[in-house]
Image (cartoon, rainbow, N blue to C red):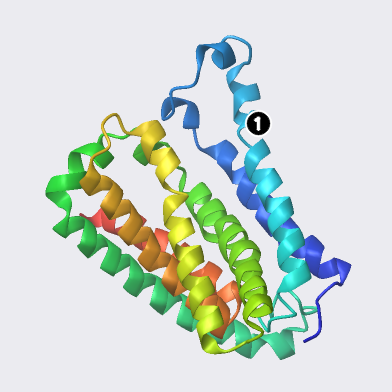
Amino acid sequence: MKIITENHFVVKIFIIGLLGVLSLLLSNFQNAIELPLEITSQYSSTQIQFLILINPLILLSISVLVGNLCFGKVGLEAPILSSKFDLQKIQPLIRDFLKVGVISGIVLGIILILISVVSEKVISSELVNSPLSSSLNIITRLMYGGITEEIFMRFGLMTFLVWIIAKISNSESNWVFLSAILISSLMFALGHLPIVYATVEVVSFGLVTYILIGNSVAGLVYGYLYWKKGLECSMISHMTTHITFVVANFLF
């Protein structure tokens, strides 16, 4: 397969990921996370907000680099971002991705909401009382959660896993992609635990189980969409899931 190495593609995917990282500035994490005294005494609130961007920016750079080197070799695609935006050519793709992404995102959002309702006795007091739940701006959820996380977990991590498993097994059959989807989904779920431990006073086994199951299910859906449709479709689905949560919270 042809490796996508054109500068315009790398720049585009880095820029949209960077916008997601910058959207973290719209959310007040200092109210949600208890920072060490040595940090709060040395830096102003504004400086801390910008310091929070360092790790995501490093992860973004690594993910874009790794993904760009590997994904064309294993047949994964970002067909809209890697095109030269010929509207006539990409219009059918955009329509298809919007349809599949929005429908899957809504269905997934409803499933995750139902899981939370079933688990309500275990998780409600812990998560509802967490300051993080009120600290995340809607734009941060859509841009960082929906776009930048997909670049981290799908374009970067899942792509690398497909490539390395295919190399080791000397195979590009379906099980290679399914294995990469499963592993990256579990890592996606585990990646949400540090922020839970940082913002929830008492983390129960039930809450950890809920976080792992919910995010693993989401990761499986987004990974499958990346494999079968393209990176942009998984981004649309992820963003739509967040929109579904916001609408549900507003209505109920």
Name the residue: 26% across, 34% down: 129
Name the spot of residue 246 as percent of width and height, x first. Answer: 35, 55
Expressed as whole percent of the image width and height from the top left, the position of residue 150 reads: 57, 62
> Split into 4 quadrants, where in the image is the C terminus?
bottom left
Q: Report the number of numbered marks.
A: 1
- Residue visible at 21% across and 48% down in the picture: 206
- 195 or 245: nearer the viewer: 195
- Image-quadrant location for residue 52: top right
Q: Residue at x 37, y 36 (%)?
A: 197
Q: Residue furthest left?
A: 121
Looking at the image, is 171 positioned above or below residue 16? Answer: below
Q: Which secondary structure lies at badge 1?
A: helix
Q: Amino acid at mark 1?
A: Phe
Q: In the rendered view, tell whether residue 139 sits above or below residue 175.
A: above
Residue under pointer 1: 50
106 with respect to 128 (left or right) = right
The image shows residue 114 at horizontal and vertical percentages of 21, 64
Q: Nearer the viewer, residue 69 or 236?
A: 69
How packed mark 1 is, by other alpha carbons closer than 10 Å (few <14, some 14-19, many 20 or more), is few
Q: Estimate the x, y position of residue 142 in percent, counting from the top left.
A: 51, 56
Q: Is residue 77 visible?
A: no
Q: Is residue 247 left or right of residue 126?
A: right
Furthest residue toward top:
41
Q: Image point 68% across, 84% down: which residue?
A: 75
Q: Is residue 126 above or below residue 35?
A: below
For the N terminus, the image quarter is bottom right
Residue 48 can be seen in this image: yes
